[in-house]
């Protein structure tokens, strides 16, 4: 039987028994669901409707900070134009 191994989604480090691992939770459909934000919790956290969220394995605080920084950078990105957005008109 092959033992599944967990790898940090930020740095690629392999999970060991003594590591203090976390999960980062985001909603990949946040633009339509309105579930904006990122959450961190223990790796064994019980999470209702886990299948609806993007769960990333995080090996510790340093990678949690990196992931949070990436999330905040993504918030700074301008949203792509959509067909529903009203066009700006010169006045
Ligand atoms: Zn890591």
Image (cartoon, rainbow, N blue to C red):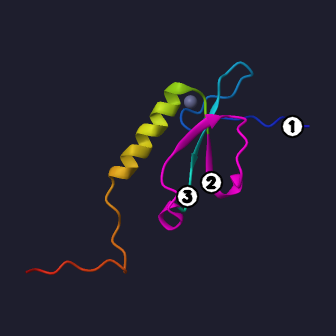
Do residues under tags 1 and 2 come within 8 Å of each other at their CB atoms?
Answer: no
> Of label 3 and label 2, which has the lower sequence position?
3
- Mark nearer the viewer, 1 or 3: 3
Side (left or right) of 88 relative to 80: left
Q: Nearer the viewer, residue 33 or 51?
A: 33
Q: Is residue 64 magenta?
A: no
- Mark nearer the viewer, 1 or 2: 2
Q: Which residue is mark 2?
A: 53
Q: Which residue is mark 1?
A: 2
Distance from the alpha carbon under mark 1 to that under mark 3: 30 Å
Residue 28 — which label? 3
What secondary structure is found at the residue carrying circle 3?
loop
- Quadrant assignment for ligand 1: top right
What secondary structure is found at the residue carrying circle 1?
loop
- Residue at coordinates 71% horizontally, 51% vertically from top-left? 48
* Number of residues whose C-alpha sits closer than 10 Å to that of mark 3, classed few (under 14), some (14–19) or many (20 or more): some
| Range shown magenta | 30-56
In the displayed structure, would residue 84 be above or below residue 21? below
Distance from the alpha carbon under mark 3 to that under mark 2: 6 Å
Residue 56 — which label? none
In the displayed structure, would residue 77 be above or below residue 83? above
Do residues under tags 3 and 2 come within 8 Å of each other at their CB atoms?
Answer: yes
In the displayed structure, would residue 27 be above or below residue 90? above
In the displayed structure, would residue 47 be above or below residue 28? above
Distance from the alpha carbon under mark 1 to that under mark 2: 27 Å
């Amino acid at each position: 039987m092959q033992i599944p191994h967990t790898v940090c989604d930020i740095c690629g480090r392999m999970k060991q028994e003594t590591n203090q691992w976390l999960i980062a939770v985001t909603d990949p459909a946040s633009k339509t669901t309105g579930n904006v934000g990122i959450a961190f919790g223990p790796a064994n956290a019980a999470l209702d409707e886990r299948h609806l969220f993007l769960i990333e394995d995080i090996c510790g605080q340093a990678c949690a900070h990196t992931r949070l920084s990436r999330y905040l950078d993504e918030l700074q990105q301008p949203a792509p134009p959509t067909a529903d957005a009203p066009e700006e008109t010169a006045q």
